[in-house]
Image (cartoon, rainbow, N blue to C red):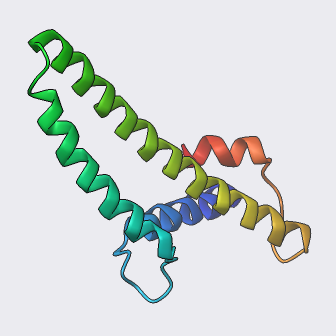
């Protein structure tokens, strides 16, 4: 029974994470939009500069940019999941949730 409960919790958390981020409960960080605009402007300048590089240098630079974007995405996902785990452990510590699963088992199921 406990595994079914945790499976449902994990399914809910994954659905919640993928929902529309414009919902009322979405966290908004004011600086994010500014940095996003600045990043897009810099990206345009970088794309112009890339055109001046040799084909091999362009390829290396583009691969690095793709890996950097992948890393940022994974860091965001990691932080998001860690927040869930911390909340679950906090609620469990307050006695509001039973803790029949270890943090390690929870992390395995979330991944």
Left or right, residue 16 beside residue 10: left
Q: Is 111 placed above or below 94 here?
A: above
Q: Nearer the viewer, residue 15 or 4?
A: 15
Q: Quadrant of residue 104?
A: top right
Q: Is 89 placed above or below 105 here?
A: below
Q: Nearer the viewer, residue 13 or 72?
A: 72
In the displayed orientation, state which residue is furthest to the bottom. 24
In the displayed orientation, state which residue is furthest to the right. 94
Q: Quadrant of the N terminus?
A: bottom right
Q: Quadrant of residue 60?
A: top left
Q: Position of residue 61 (x, y in %)?
A: 26, 23
Q: Nearer the viewer, residue 97 or 29?
A: 29
Q: Residue at x 50, y 85 (%)?
A: 25
Left or right, residue 54 beside residue 3: left
Q: Residue at x 90, y 67 (%)?
A: 93
Q: Position of residue 39 (x, y in %)?
A: 33, 53
Q: Is 91 placed above or below 105 here?
A: below
Q: Is 95 placed above or below 41 here?
A: below
Q: Position of residue 24 (x, y in %)?
A: 45, 89
Q: Residue at x 16, y 20 (%)?
A: 58
Q: Quadrant of the C terminus?
A: top right
Left or right, residue 25 beside residue 57: right
Q: Residue at x 50, y 68 (%)?
A: 12
- Tally of marks: 0
């Amino acid at each position: 029974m406990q595994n079914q409960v945790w499976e449902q919790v994990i399914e809910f958390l994954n659905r919640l994470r993928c929902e529309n981020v414009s919902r009322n409960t979405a966290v908004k960080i004011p600086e994010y939009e500014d940095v996003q605009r600045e990043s897009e402007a810099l990206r345009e300048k970088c794309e112009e500069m890339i055109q001046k590089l040799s084909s091999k240098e362009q390829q290396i630079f583009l691969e690095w940019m793709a890996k950097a974007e992948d890393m940022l995405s994974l860091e965001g996902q990691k932080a998001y999941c860690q927040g869930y785990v911390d909340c679950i452990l906090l609620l469990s510590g307050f006695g509001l949730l039973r803790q029949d699963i270890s943090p390690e088992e929870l992390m395995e199921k979330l991944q």
